[in-house]
Image (tube, grey):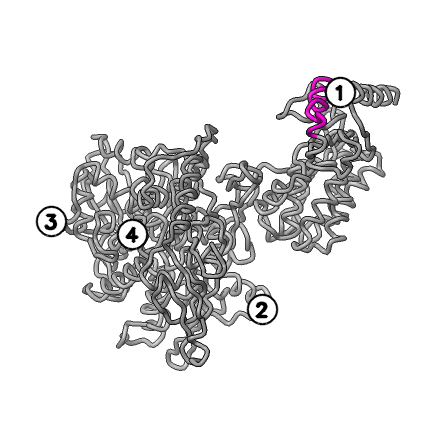
Amino acid sequence: MNTNTTDTVKQTLFVDGRELPINGERNVLEMARKAGIDIPTFCYHSELSVYGACRLCLVEIEGRGIQASCSVAPEPGMRLRTNTKKVRDIRKISIELLLANHDMTCPTCSRSATCRLRELAERMGIDKVRYKPIERKAPLDHSSLALVRDPNKCVLCGDCVRACHELQGVGAIDFAFRGADSAVLPAFNQDLAEVECVNCGLCASVCPTGALTPRPEMEEVWADLDNPNKIVVAQMAPAVRVGLGEYFGMEPGSITTGQAVAALKAIGFDKVYDTSFAADMTVLEEGEEFLDRFKNQGVLPLFTSCCPAWVKYAEQYHHELLPHLSSCKSPQQMFGAVARKVLPKVMDMKGKELVVVSVMPCTAKKYEAKQEKFIHDGVPEVNHVITTAELGLMLRQCGLQLADLEPAAFDKHISFKTGAGVLFGVTGGVTEAVLRYAVEQVQGKPLEDVDFREVRGEKGLREATVTVDGIELRLAIVNGLAQAAAVIESIKNGTCAYHLVEVMACPGGCVAGAGQPHTFNPAARQMRTRAIYDNDKMLDYQKSQDNPELIKCYADHFDGVGGHTAHETLHTEYTHRKRLHEIDIALQEGESKGTLPIQVCVGTNCFLNGSQDLLKKLMHHVDQQGLTDQVSITATFCMENCGKSPNVRVGATHLEACTFEAACRSLEEQLGSKAL
Amino acid sequence: MQQTMRKFDTLCDIIDRFDRDPAKLISILQAVQAEYRYLPKEALAYIATSLNLPPARVFGVATFYAHFALEPKGKYVIHVCDGTACHVKNSQGLVNAIQKKLGLTTDKNTTEDLLFTLETVSCLGACGLAPVLVINEDVHGMMTPQKCVEALDKIIEREAQQ
């Protein structure tokens, strides 16, 4: 017990009799794992708060009995045992209880190969469940364009709840009800598509089972591949090439670009292109936009707009940021738009319909492609979006092994890329790529060193300053939407000193997106990141502006970077977006037919700008004037016009920045004309 | 409609009275439920907006506590005690009698006319009066199924006169 009393320098404790030094570990679970003992857990996730709910990480501590190791801080002299009969028995019971509750349709579950519950049941040697199963099926939620929610497979570990709340600052799902009725649900048990979910899929990434999974689109792709009247082309995102291999048992970070191209061709794609080409294009368009704003005192900081989860987040929560967002479409949508513009001119379409399929490491891209603004005359820029893992599955369906395929090259015209385009796959990558363009433009001579190591790293919020010819460019790089809060706050209170802010929703950037193959390897993200930087080095060019195919594309099909055609094809606009759907408060319902409807917005922005007072005054006014049977009043959540709050609608008239007087005037006018 | 307006006023006042402080969410929900007799979805959404909390979090808190109701409750809430003492003195018989009288089941515990809601509680701390039930604030001790029906009849009659 007191072997350490004289040793003040080195503090130790004992795990299964082995003495181990304490080096600032948060809990004894981390200590045991360092000692090479993989203590099972569901709810422990090193990037999330400690929750202590799953009771699988139990250990026996001398003098304290059974404890959840995630929730016990290491103390010198502590003696813990991780493998006693008691510990084994309790763990087994915990898993059996979960299995009794679980919808065990494993052969048809997309996560069966990577299911933590299945893996632990196997590890614990569970060959039968002693408890009576509960036959209570909840309906699946297929509403989201990005994700499928199957409550029957939830083990209530809360990883998704904490990831959404703590890492993304969204909180679209949370625990509801209690005891046997406990469930993880969107607000009011609404569909996921009707709440503030930004489709990032982090919940699906951390889910140990198949309760949250990316929405599959493979069948739609197969149908088009089988259709002889369609020419089907693929675009492949940068992060796919360093993730796909894992699906076939390769080391994380194995670069399989050539094999992936060969695989796409093998399963029937007519042409295969590289999204990195469109990323290079984004660099030029966004770089120009940035320089223009920088030189001409435009709206700064400029926020990147490649990440659709971030864009939806900004549209929902921060209307005042929208002028800060780069008007550039994301590389996925740029590629789709360019493909539709260029391909019919450079290849023989034989009168067939062009279908564009994206392979993405991301679930939010599924949502992005289906936005109305990216569909023109019924033709979407991008028809279908499959994830890296879905591509892996499609290959396996065909009996193809990635490693066995002879590497193939991307098709020409819109595929050639530089290292800058590939960097889009990691956090800090877009910033570095834009710097390689912007700094060269500012200093007017070629860059000597293309590496901007100061923007690389893993921290959720990173700051860097790059000085060119005495001009300071101040940058911020955010990964994990919750980390954007500090930057956004500084813009609101006028203290923001940044010029360019990159935001990616997924910690680590796209390499760790929810569309990548599932992994239990905590080092996978770092290994994929390293592979992206290696790939940058291996390519012929590192700067987007040096991309010969891109230069030719601009010359043949556009009127220069940032020109009119470029703007029409490659840029977009943003709208305010409401977070809650289908919730209105009917406050007063007129009794006569054809009452005049009044709607007062009580969404966050209007609320902060005094819509509550306005609403109250209006109700009293209607009451005092004896108009109660002629008008109906509703409080509604967000009219998607947050920049001009408070918003009121009287009949068909929309009143922006509405005052009580303005609302009354409009009310009187409309009631008066009615009376006539 | 006067009533909905008054209620919305009260809702706003409650939120302001608790300083729009997310830490006071439970107190706010209690006060709102006292006003509405339940927590309408719209009110929860409004509370979430005004406290700057995700609506899913507010919904989670509101559904966790047995005290909070998301469906409208009756004007008269009957709490039948099912603590140990009442249980052995046949509290289930009281529940059965009330359910039969009011046409309620375990899943449907409020009458169509929103007059009665039936709930069981674990102990009212009046074991000497077992079996015991409370209708709103009035305690009824030493109950029998027959006395339950009589008590309900009295309320129904009084309501009919009003």
Quadrant of the drawing holding the C terminus of chain B: top right
Q: Chain of mark 2?
A: A
Question: Looking at the picture, which amino acid does disc 1 mark?
Answer: Pro
Whole-percent x, y for residue A397 in the image: 21, 36
- Is disc 3 in contact with disc 1, using a CB cutoff of under 8 Å? no
Separation of residues labelled 3 and 2 (CA atoms)? 56 Å
Q: Is residue A607 magenta?
A: no
**Residue B145: which disc?**
1
Q: Which residues are magenta?
A: B87-102
Separation of residues labelled 4 and 2 (CA atoms)? 36 Å
- Mark 4 / mark 3, whichever is N-terminal: 4
Q: Is residue B93 magenta?
A: yes
Question: Looking at the picture, which amino acid does disc 3 mark?
Answer: Glu
Look at discs 3 and 1 and give the one toward the viewer: 1
Whole-percent x, y for residue B154 in the image: 85, 21
- Left or right: where A228 falls relative to A672: left
The residue under label 4 is A237
